[in-house]
Image: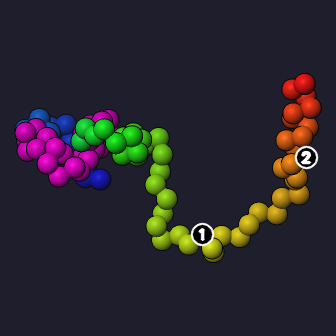
């Protein structure tokens, strides 16, 4: 994501706003090198909004799930569910 300073944004605001609106790109605003805000396009797509807000991180497309070793878990999910249901009664 491109970063620009507050002063740069102030001097060229319309240029940056146009880029965000037309190209659907996001720009991070910094104050003395410290990120303080983001210009992001408005969208009605919940997924895009959550990614832009940092609420979710998209999966890395370079990872092949078949290469991931399964965890060794000695827990029986059926047994746990049975116990939980017994406590509900």
Estimate the spatial distance between the alpha carbons at disc 2 and disc 1, rounded to whole Å: 28 Å
Q: Is 29 covered by the magenta stretch?
A: yes
Judge depth for marks 2 and 1 and give the one in front: 2
Sequence-wise first label, 2 or 1: 1
Could you tell me how many numbered marks the image carries? Answer: 2
Q: Residues within 10 Å of mark 1 (few under 14, many from 20)?
A: few
Residue 69 falls within the magenta-colored stretch: no
Q: Tell me, what colour scheme is on the image?
A: rainbow
Write down the residue under mark 2. Answer: 79
Q: Residue 18 in the image: x percent, y percent?
A: 10, 44
Bounds of the magenta span? 12-40
Q: Position of residue 12 (x, y in %)?
A: 8, 41
* Left or right of residue 58, residue 22 in this image: left
At mark 2, the secondary structure is helix
Secondary structure beneath label 1? helix
Locate residue 43: give its quadrant.
Answer: top left
Q: Which residue is mark 1?
A: 65
Residue 63 percent location from the top left of the image = 53, 70
Q: Nearer the viewer, residue 63 or 83?
A: 83
């Amino acid at each position: 994501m491109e970063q620009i300073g507050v002063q740069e944004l102030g001097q060229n605001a319309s240029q940056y706003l146009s880029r965000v609106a037309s190209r659907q790109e996001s720009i991070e605003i910094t104050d003395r090198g410290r990120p303080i805000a983001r210009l992001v396009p408005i969208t009605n797509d919940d997924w895009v909004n959550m990614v832009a807000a940092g609420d979710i991180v998209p999966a890395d497309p370079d990872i092949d799930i078949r290469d991931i070793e399964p965890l060794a878990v000695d827990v029986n999910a059926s047994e746990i569910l049975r116990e939980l249901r017994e406590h509900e009664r």
